[in-house]
Image (spheres, grey):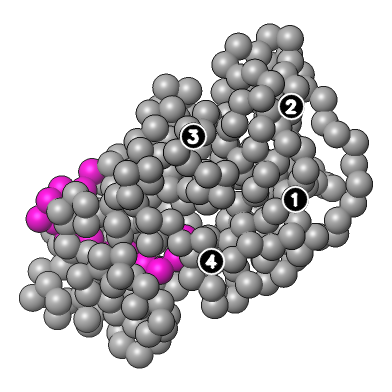
C-alpha cells in the first residue's frame, strides 16, 4: 500500500461524499490487500469510518451537507474523502465521538448481530468466545455478559487474558499454554457449550466441534488463521447434530431499517457506558501499512484507527 493523491470523488445521484475524520482498520482490509477477497485493481482499502458530509447527489434524501455520519462496508475508506451510497451512512449522535463511531461500526455491529441474531444468546447459556481480547471479542464478551450468559474466552497471552477478564469473561484460556478443548470440557463438566463464536477459522475449527453441547451452534464470522477446509455435513451429526453458520455483517444490516436499529442500539450502549470500546492505537493515514503489520502480528489488543 502506498499513499497517493487522487481526485476528490463526486457523488452519483443517490450518493454522498464524506470528509473522513477517522477510518477503522479491520481484518477484512487485509483479506482485500492479500487477495483472499477480490476487487478490481488498483483500489483504496478500508471499509469503515466516520466524518462529515460535504456533498450529496441530486436524489439523496436521507443525508445532507454538514451531517455527522458513520459507515461500514464502504470500500475506499482509507482516504481523506469517501463516496458512499446514502443508505450505508448512519447518523452519529452528539453523545458519540468520531473515534467511538469509527471504532464500533464493524466490530460493534458484528458483536451485536452475533449475540442477538446469529445465535440468540440467552441468560444461563455458556458461550465460547475465541480471540476474546480482539476487536470483536472484547465487545462480544461485554454483550454476552449483559445478557446473563456465562463466557469462556480464549486468548494468546496472559496480558490479553487479563483484558478479556476485565471485559467480563468468567474464564479465559490462554491457548498457547493450555489446550482449549480440554479446558472447555473441564469447565463445563464435560457437557460443552451452547454456542461457539469464532473469528479464527482454520486453527480452531476441528476442536470447536468437540466442545459443543448436543445440538450446539458454531458461528464462524472470520478466518484470521485461514479459511476452514471443506467439511462433510455428516460430521455435524456425528458430533451431536450440531448447527453451523458462516456469517458476514452485510447480511445482518441488509436493509436500511435493520442498519439503523442496530446502530441505534449500539450507540445507545456506548453513550450509557454499558459498552466500553478499547481504542488501542491511532496512526496517520500514511502509516496504514504499519497498522496492517501490527494487526496481523496480533500484538495489539483492541481497535486500530487511521487519521487522515
Q: Which mark is residue 94?
A: 3
Q: Which element carries disc 4, helix, strand or loop?
A: strand
| Badge 4 or badge 3: first in the primary sequence | 3
Pointer 1 local density, CA inside 10 Å: few below 14, some 14–19, many at least 20? some
How would you rate the neighbour count of disc 3 (Cα within 10 Å): few for under 14, some for 14-19, many for 20 or more? few
Pointer 1: what residue?
Answer: 308
In the rendered image of this protein, does residue 303 appear above or below residue 15?
Answer: below
* Mark 3 to mark 2 CA distance (whole Å): 18 Å
Measuring 50% from the left and 48% from the top, which residue is drawn there?
Answer: 100
Q: Main secondary structure of the magenta part?
A: loop
Instruction: Tell whether 165 sits left or right of 40.
Output: left
Under tag 2, what secondary structure? strand
Q: Nearer the viewer, residue 142 or 65?
A: 65
Query: Distance from label 4 to label 3 (Cα)?
Result: 23 Å
Query: Which residue is label 2 attached to?
Result: 54
Q: Earlier in the sequence, mark 1 or mark 3?
A: 3
Tell me whether circle 3 and circle 2 mark residues in contact (CB < 8 Å): no
Q: Are marks 2 and 4 in contact (CB under 8 Å)?
A: no
**Residue 62: % across, % down:** 57, 16
Point out which mark residue 280 bears: 4
Q: Secondary structure at mark 1?
A: loop
259 vs 28, left or right, is left
Q: Which residues are magenta?
A: 120-135
Side of 227 relative to 6 (left or right): left
> Is 23 rendered above or below residue 291?
above
Amino acid at each position: 500500500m502506498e499513499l497517493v493523491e487522487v481526485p476528490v470523488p463526486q457523488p452519483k445521484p443517490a450518493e454522498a461524499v464524506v470528509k473522513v475524520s477517522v477510518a477503522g482498520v479491520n481484518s477484512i482490509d487485509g483479506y482485500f490487500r492479500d487477495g483472499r477477497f477480490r476487487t478490481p485493481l488498483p483500489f483504496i482499502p478500508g471499509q469503515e469510518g466516520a466524518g462529515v458530509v460535504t456533498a450529496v447527489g441530486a436524489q439523496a434524501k436521507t443525508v445532507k451537507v454538514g451531517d455527522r455520519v458513520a459507515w461500514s462496508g464502504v470500500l475506499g475508506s482509507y482516504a481523506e474523502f469517501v463516496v458512499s451510497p446514502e443508505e450505508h451512512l448512519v447518523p452519529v449522535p452528539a453523545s458519540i465521538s468520531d473515534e467511538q463511531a469509527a471504532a464500533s461500526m464493524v466490530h460493534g455491529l458484528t458483536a451485536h448481530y452475533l449475540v442477538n441474531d446469529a445465535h440468540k444468546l440467552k441468560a444461563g447459556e455458556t458461550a465460547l468466545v475465541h480471540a476474546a481480547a480482539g476487536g470483536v471479542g472484547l465487545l462480544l464478551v461485554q454483550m454476552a455478559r449483559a445478557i446473563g450468559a456465562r463466557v469462556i474466552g480464549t486468548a494468546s497471552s496472559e496480558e490479553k487474558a487479563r483484558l478479556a477478564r476485565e471485559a467480563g469473561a468468567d474464564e479465559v484460556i490462554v491457548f498457547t499454554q493450555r489446550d482449549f478443548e480440554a479446558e472447555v470440557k473441564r469447565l463445563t463438566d464435560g457437557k460443552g457449550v451452547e454456542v461457539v463464536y469464532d473469528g479464527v477459522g482454520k486453527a480452531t475449527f476441528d476442536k470447536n466441534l468437540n466442545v459443543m453441547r448436543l445440538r450446539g451452534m458454531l458461528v464462524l464470522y472470520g478466518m484470521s488463521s485461514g479459511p476452514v477446509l471443506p467439511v462433510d455435513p455428516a460430521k455435524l451429526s456425528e458430533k451431536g447434530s450440531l448447527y453451523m453458520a458462516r456469517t458476514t455483517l452485510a447480511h445482518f444490516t441488509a436493509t436500511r431499517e435493520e442498519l439503523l436499529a442496530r446502530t441505534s442500539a449500539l450507540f445507545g450502549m456506548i453513550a450509557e457506558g454499558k459498552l466500553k470500546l478499547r481504542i488501542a492505537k491511532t496512526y496517520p493515514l500514511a502509516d496504514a501499512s504499519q497498522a496492517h503489520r501490527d494487526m496481523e502480528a496480533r500484538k495489539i489488543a483492541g481497535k486500530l484507527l487511521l487519521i487522515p
